[in-house]
């Protein structure tokens, strides 16, 4: 049952359809267990991933899931597609259909994608105002010019979205490759940035999203669960 922050008593009253008097009674009798601990204070907030039971009957039980995946080329960053394989297909578990992506990659791009069933967590990564850094390895068909690097570092305007991008962090690796950190994640943003200088991106690989880094030992097509540091509100 998806809900905003509610108290245990409110949740019991609504979930059972028996009202506040019933909620107060079962709390007083010590029949309510929050995360396997008996409680009598119904004013406690119930988080969406808390387990709540009354006399052994589960009222809420939802397992939070957070996955780091090493997306291969040719796989869609989508939850379903009638033609192509998706990141969900790579997981191959029944619960995978409850997941969504916290930031997509286009079909040709490889590297880190994050999947979760926690919308608050994914929104914290994707909300533009949070300016979450995303780091990529970029390879190009032509040398990366000093002019391009200067413009990237100063922040580029994007007329379609009517915004000016935050200054990018650029580290030249070879004349045709660099490590690039951006903060927006606009549609094909990096490819569009290079094309303004007549340079085509030939390979794009995402290494990190905020503090979440693609593990070096995570093979292409594999995933790994993790537990992020989450805000304490509504928990």
Image (cartoon, rainbow, N blue to C red):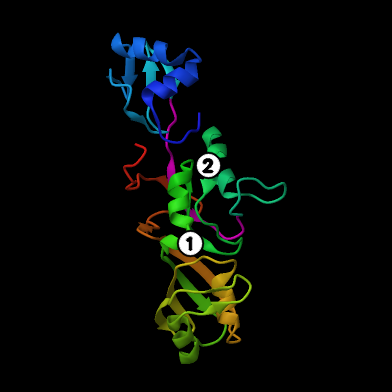
Quadrant where the C terminus is found in the figure: top left
Reading the image, the residue beneath label 2 is 99
Q: On the image, numbered disc 1 is attached to which residue?
A: 128
Whether the magenta-drawn stretch holds residue 152 is answered as: no
Q: Can residue 219 be seen at all in this image of the molecule?
A: no
Furthest toward the right, the residue is 82
- The percent coordinates of residue 61 (x first, y second) are 43, 26
Measuring 33% from the left and 22% from the top, which residue is drawn there? Answer: 42
Q: Magenta part of the protein: which range?
A: 61-75
Q: Is residue 224 left or right of residue 193?
A: left
Please provide percent x and percent y for residue 48: 42, 33
How many numbered circles does the render carry?
A: 2
Measuring 52% from the left and 62% from the top, which residue is drawn there? Answer: 110
Compared to 121, does 178 lie above or below? below
Does the magenta stretch mainly form a helix, a strand or a loop? Answer: loop
Q: Who is closer to the viewer here, 74 or 184? A: 184
Could you tell me which secondary element the residue under label 2 belongs to?
loop
Q: Quadrant of residue 172?
A: bottom left
Rendered position, 115 above or below 109: above
């Amino acid at each position: 049952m998806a809900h905003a922050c509610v108290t245990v008593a409110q949740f019991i009253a609504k979930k059972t359809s028996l009202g506040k008097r019933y909620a107060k009674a079962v709390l007083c009798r010590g029949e309510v267990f929050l995360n396997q601990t008996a409680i009598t204070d119904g004013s406690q907030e119930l988080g969406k991933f808390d387990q709540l039971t009354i006399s052994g009957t589960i009222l809420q039980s939802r397992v939070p899931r957070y996955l780091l995946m090493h997306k291969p080329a040719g796989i869609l960053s989508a939850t379903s597609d009638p033609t192509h394989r998706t990141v969900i297909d790579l997981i191959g578990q029944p619960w995978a259909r409850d997941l969504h992506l916290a930031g997509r990659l286009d079909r040709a791009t490889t590297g880190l994608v994050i999947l979760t069933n926690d919308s608050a967590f994914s929104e914290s990564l994707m909300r533009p105002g949070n300016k979450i850094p995303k780091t990529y390895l970029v390879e190009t068909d032509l040398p990366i010019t000093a002019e391009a690097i200067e413009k990237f570092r100063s922040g580029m305007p994007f007329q379609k979205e009517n915004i000016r991008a935050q200054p990018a962090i650029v580290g030249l690796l070879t004349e045709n490759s660099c490590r690039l950190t951006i903060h927006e994640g606009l549609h094909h943003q990096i490819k569009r940035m290079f094309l303004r200088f007549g340079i085509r991106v030939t390979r794009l690989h995402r290494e990190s999203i905020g503090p979440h880094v693609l593990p070096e030992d995570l093979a292409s097509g594999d995933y790994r669960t993790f537990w992020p540091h989450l805000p304490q509100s509504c928990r």
